[in-house]
Image (cartoon, rainbow, N blue to C red):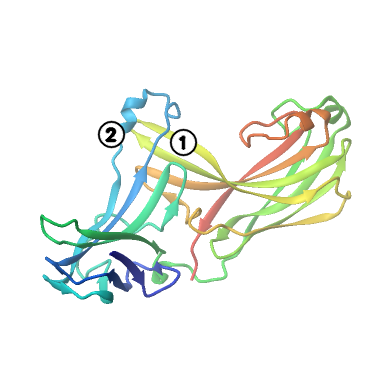
Amino acid sequence: MSVEIKLSRSNRIYRPNEPVEGKIVTKLSSSISHQGIRLNVNASVNLQVRGGSAGVIESIYGVIKPITILNKTVEVLKSGRISSGTTEIPFSFKLKDRGEKPLEKFYETYHGGDISIQYLVTVDISRGYLHKSLSATLEFIIESEKENLPEKPISPEMVIFYMTQDTQRHSLLPELQSGGFRVSGKVCTLCSLSDPIEGELTVESSAVPIQSIDIHLLRVESILVGEKIATESSLIQTTQIADGDVCRAMTLPIYIILPRLLTCPSIFAGPFSIEFKVNLVITFQSEQSKVHSKSNFKTLRSWHAAESVPLELIRTK
C-alpha cells in the first residue's frame, strides 16, 4: 500500500504563473474507501541562526519563524473508493490565482546553509479515524517568471585583480615575504545562473613554487535577529584550476559551472539576504602545508595567498 506524487515535468521546474500538473499514483493490494483526496501546497523561507554568529544568547534564535510564501489546499477528489492495483489520479493547481495577492514574493528555490527556500506539495488521502491516512510529499522547483527577467545575453562585468605579498593581510612564509610573488587576472562579478563563471589568471612571478590554485564559491547569508544581523559564510564548492607549479606568464582559464539549487539570484530582502562571492586561493609548496593538508577556507595559513571578489547572480530568459 503506497502513494506517490509524479509531476508532469521530469525536472520539476515551474514558474509562479504556470499551472503545476501531475498525477497521484496509488498501489494497493485491495480496494479502500476514502473521505477525500487533497493536496496541500506549502512554500516558505526557513531561517536558522547558529549559536554565536550574532553575538547573543542562543535562546533568542528559537523565535525566528519561517516566512510563509504560499499555503493553500486543493481538493482533488471527494469521498469515494480507490480500486486495487495501480491507480493514477490527475491533478492541476495554480500557484497564483488571478486577483489573489500573494503572502510573500515568490523567491526561487534555494538550499543553503542557514537559509532555505522550499516549495512542497503533499497529498493526503483521508481514511477516517480507524485507518491511517496515506500521504506523500514532493518538492518542486520554482524559478522567476520570464516576463520579469532581463534578455540574454547580459553584458559581462569583469573585475581586474592582482595578488602580491603586499596585498595579503595575514602573515606569509619568510621566503614569500622576502622573495615576493605577483598573480594577476580578471573574473566575472555579474553572472547569469545558466552561464559559467568565467575569467583568467596569470602567475607573473613567484619566489616559492606553487602547489595548487583553487577557487572557492561561497554563499554569504544574513538574517535579521531583533536589532542585530547574523551573517554566516559557507562553502558551496571548490574548483581547482591548477595543480603543481604552473608556468610563469601563462594565462590560465577560469570556468566554473554553478550548481543547481545551491545557488539562486542574489536576494536583498528585509528579514534576510543571500549573496555570493568568489575566493581565489593560491597554495605554495611548503613543508608546513604537508603537515596541515586540510585547511579551512576561513583560515588562511602562511603558505596561502587569497583574493575575494563579490559575485552577483541573476536569472535571465
Q: Position of residue 56 (x, y in %)?
A: 38, 24
Disc on res. 231: 1
> Secondary structure beneath disc 2?
helix
Q: Position of residue 120 (x, y in %)?
A: 32, 58
Residue toward you, 2 or 55: 2
Disc on res. 262: none
Q: Is residue 37 above or below residue 178?
A: below
Q: Residues within 10 Å of mark 1 (few under 14, many from 20)?
A: some
Residue toward you, 86 or 242: 86
Count how many numbered circles sit on residues in the image: 2
Residue toward you, 281 or 101: 281
Q: Which quarter of the picture shows residue 190?
A: bottom right
Q: Earlier in the sequence, mark 1 or mark 2?
A: 2
Which residue position is annotated with label 2?
A: 63
Specify the farthest residue to the front.
29
Q: Amino acid at mark 2?
A: Val
Distance from label 1 to label 2 (Cα)? 17 Å
> Secondary structure beneath disc 1?
strand
Q: Is residue 233 left or right of residue 80?
A: right
Name the residue located 63 percent from the left edge and 34 percent from the top edge: 296
Q: Amino acid at mark 1?
A: Thr
Is the residue under label 2 in contact with that under label 1 (CB below 8 Å)? no
Residue toward you, 145 or 11: 11
Q: Residues within 10 Å of mark 2 (few under 14, many from 20)?
A: few
Q: Position of residue 191 (x, y in %)?
A: 57, 59
Name the residue located 72 percent from the left edge and 50 percent from the top edge: 240
